[in-house]
Amino acid sequence: MKKYYTYAYLREDGTPYYIGKGTSKRAWSKKHRVHLPNDPNNIQIIQQDLTDEEAKRLETELITKYGRKDLGTGILHNQTNGGDGANLRGNKNGMYGKQHTLEARDKIKQARSKQIMLPRTDEQRQAQSLRLKGRDRPPRLDGLPNHHTPETKAKISSAHLGKSKKKGYVQSAEQKQKKLESFRRTMALKKLSSDQVKD
């Protein structure tokens, strides 16, 4: 079933620091070994509608392309080469029967200590908001445009017309008029029924 996708977490400069694969809301889950980007726009879905194997393969290819910090081969904080990754157990895991050196343990400890996200103050939030206003989104890794074209926006708009009202949804004047007329007809019928009962 093609329900999987491959995603990336981007730095402020647009370079990826983590590549993953998952389903549903995995990319937005806080249950990661790395912190989520502060800016939601820096969570990028690279490719979706994939099978499990296709998502694993793309994840592995991208991790190989950008390299891992813990191995000194690149810029990613991934601690596996992708695919089954951390889910591998026993002799299928690359660390099976091995131990990290004291030097490696210190490096891992230092790296993880920097990943702790402390609660931000109102001043920090305001500063970030001002910093991000008017900033162009980082380019997508798959080369597609960041924003919908006017044609796509028109299609989305027409698709939502007539649907139930949701938070932030604005009805057109025509929709409001139709609802008002329907309400008036209903009230007129109720009044007529009430008058007939009285007679």
Image: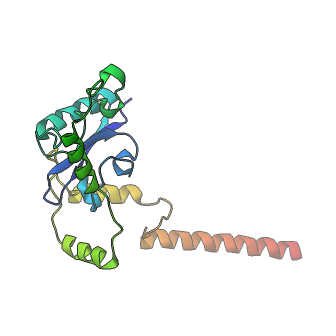
Q: Residue at x 67, y 69 (%)?
A: 186
Q: Quadrant of the N terminus?
A: top left
Is any atom of residue 199 visible in this view? Answer: no
Instruction: Tell me where residue 191 sits by quadrant.
Output: bottom right
* Residue farthest front in this picture: 102
Give the residue drawn at x 32%, y 36%: 49
Percent x, y for residue 137? 18, 60
Of all residues, the one furthest to the right in this rendering is 199
Depth check, front residue: 195 or 173: 173
Q: Quadrant of the C terminus?
A: bottom right
Residue at 34%, 65% (x, y): give it: 118
In this view of the protein, which residue sits in the foreground, 71 or 133? 71
- Asked if residue 58 lies left or right of residue 73, the reply is right
- Depth check, front residue: 65 or 35: 35
Spot occupied by residue 169 in the image (x, y as percentages of width and height): 43, 67
Instruction: State whether residue 66 is above or below residue 128.
Output: above
Q: Give the x, y percent position of residue 134.
A: 17, 72
Query: Does 192 appear above or below 18?
Result: below
Residue 144: x and y, percent?
A: 17, 48
For this orientation, the residue located farthest to the bottom is 123
Res 9 seen here: yes
Using the rendered view, name the quadrant where residue 115 is placed. Answer: bottom left
